[in-house]
Image (cartoon, grey):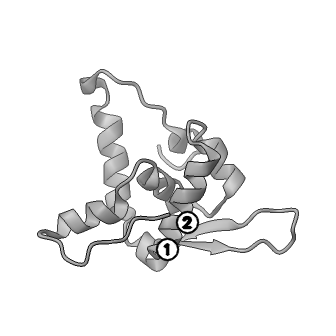
Amino acid sequence: MAKKLATRFMCPSEFALDVLGGKWKTVILCYLKYQPLRYTELRKLVPALSDKVLSERLRELVDKGLVIKIAAESRKSSATYTLSARGRSLGTLLQELYTWGANNAAAFGVQVDEPLRRMGYLK
């Protein structure tokens, strides 16, 4: 169950981080920024994420109005997830987070994969 959003925040960035907080939300939003994806496609892009957590995060993003779940036309295919207008408004922020992570990972002694680059979305 998604936690209830507070009704008052001391700073706009506190509010933004509360909405986007929680591991994996920004990763999911980054992928959806480039194209609508089915659950199974998201699952392949984030193999470290369990089915339970992916389902929870998608539900939270839909509940917050950042993602739209489009029901499948047939029972054999899964629903498709796409960014809502509010979700698309995060595009620049999501790109900056991705770029910052790619540019600074080595300084923190970590390696990062770049699936968006492999998929041809980034040069």
In the figure, 34 relative to 49: above or below?
below
Q: Secondary structure at mark 2?
A: helix
Q: To which residue does mark 2 refer?
A: 59
**What is the C-alpha distance between the residues marked 2 and 1?**
6 Å
Q: Position of residue 69 (x, y in %)?
A: 63, 72
Q: Position of residue 84 (x, y in %)?
A: 50, 76
Identified at 47% across, 76% down, the residue is: 65
Q: Position of residue 33 (x, y in %)?
A: 50, 61
In the foreground, 26 or 62: 62
Asked if the residues shown at circle 2 and circle 1 are in contact, with their CB atoms under 8 angstroms apart, the answer is yes
Q: Amino acid at mark 1?
A: Asp
Q: Amino acid at mark 2?
A: Arg
In the figure, 17 relative to 85: above or below?
above
Judged from this view, the residue extending furthest toward the left is: 10
Image-based side of 64 in relation to 116, left or right: left
Q: Residues within 10 Å of mark 2 (few under 14, many from 20)?
A: some
Identified at 42% across, 54% down, the residue is: 26
Image-based side of 55 in relation to 123, left or right: right
Q: To which residue does mark 1 refer?
A: 63
